[in-house]
Image (cartoon, rainbow, N blue to C red):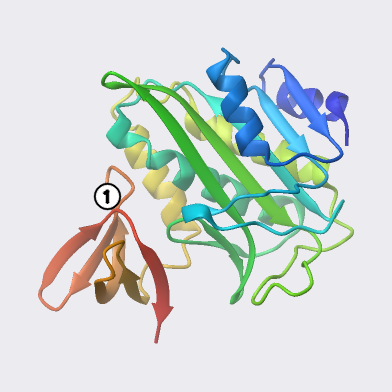
Amino acid sequence: MNDGDLRRALELAGITAPTRWHANVGSTNAEAAAWAGAGAPEFALVAAAHQTAGRGRRGRGWEDVPGGALMFSFVLRPLLAPDDAGLLPLLAGAAMALAAAAVVGADVRCKCPNDLMLGDAKAGGVLAESAVGGEALTYVVVGIGVNLVAPEGVPGATGLGADVDPMALLSAFLRVFVGGYGDAGSGAGFADEVRARWRSVSGTLGRGVRVTQTDGRTIRGRAVDVDGWGGLVLEVGADRITVRSGEVELVR
C-alpha cells in the first residue's frame, strides 16, 4: 500500500482527506493525534506496514508482523458530547467486523470493549483517543489494527489470512463506517444505529462476563445490552447495572 491507495480508499467512501503512509512508524494513533492537534481535517488518515511502538488499551503494547497487518488511524471531529465518544469505537469495531465478513467471509465478532475476535482468538482491536475543549470534543482519533498474519509469541492471537488484500479490507471498512457515521451527533438516531450495528456482530451479548474495574473490584453477570453512551449493561441477579470501564472477560 501507499499514499495513493489510502486516498483511493477514502474516495471510494466518498471522502477527500489528506493521508500519510509509512513503511515503519512508532504508532499510527500517536501520529494521527499530533496531526489532529495541528489542525488535520476530519478523516485525515495515517497507516503503516509496521509499528515499532504500537499501542492498545490501558498502556498495553501491540505487536504486529511487518507487512502482515492492516494498521491505520484517522481523525474525527464529531458533533458529539464528550460522554457520547464511547459510541465511536463501537461503530468502528462493528464496521471492521462487517468489512471482514464482506471481504474475507470471516465471522469476526466484537468483544467488549474493543477486541475483534475470530472464534476464541484475537484478530485485532480498536483504540479511540479524544481531546476535549470546554464541553465539546475537539477531536477523536480512532485506531484499528487487524492481523492478517498472527504474530509469533503472542498468546491468543490470530490473523485473517496472509492472502487478504489490506486495501480491499480498508476500503470496505471505510465505506461501512462512513455509512454509519454520517454527521455524528446531528441526529437523535445516531446512538440507536450504532447500537444496532454493534449488536449484530457482538460476541459478548448473551454471555457470562467478569468485569475487573480500575480499582480492582470485579463484577460478574450476563451481558445483555449496550446503552446509549456505549456502556455495557449487565444482568446481575435481579438487577441491571452498566459498566463504562474495566477489563471484560467472557466466562462460562
Q: Position of residue 224 (x, y in %)?
A: 29, 66
Which residue is located at x 68 percent, y 41 percent? Answer: 27
Which residue is located at x 75 percent, y 75 percent? Answer: 153
Which residue is located at x 45 percent, y 52 percent? Answer: 198
Q: Nearer the viewer, residue 213 or 223?
A: 213
| Total numbered labels | 1
Horizontal arrangement in the rendering, residue 223 relative to residue 107 (left or right): left
Check the picture and name the quadrant holding the C terminus. Answer: bottom left
Q: Position of residue 97 (x, y in %)?
A: 60, 54
Inspect this view and state whether residue 175 appears.
Answer: no
Q: Relative to 46, is 97 above or below? A: below
Q: Nearer the viewer, residue 93 or 215?
A: 215
Which residue is located at x 83 percent, y 44 percent? Answer: 49
* Residue denoted by label 1: 227
Q: Relative to 8, is 97 above or below? A: below
Q: Position of residue 240 (x, y in %)?
A: 15, 65
Inspect this view and state whether residue 177 appears.
Answer: yes
Q: Nearer the viewer, residue 58 or 181?
A: 58
Q: Relative to 134, is 122 above or below? A: below
Q: Position of residue 149 (x, y in %)?
A: 81, 63
Check the picture and name the quadrant holding the N terminus. Answer: top right
Provide the secondary structure element on which disc 1 rests.
loop
Horizontal arrangement in the rendering, residue 172 relative to residue 86 (left or right): right
Q: Relative to 115, is 83 above or below? A: above
Name the kind of residue labelled 1 in the image.
Answer: Asp
Q: Nearer the viewer, residue 145 or 57?
A: 57
Quarter of the figure with residue 151: bottom right
Kindly give the residue lying farthest to the left in the view shown. Answer: 238
Graded by Cα atoms within 10 Å as few (under 14), some (14 to 19) or many (20 or more), the crowding at tag 1 reads some
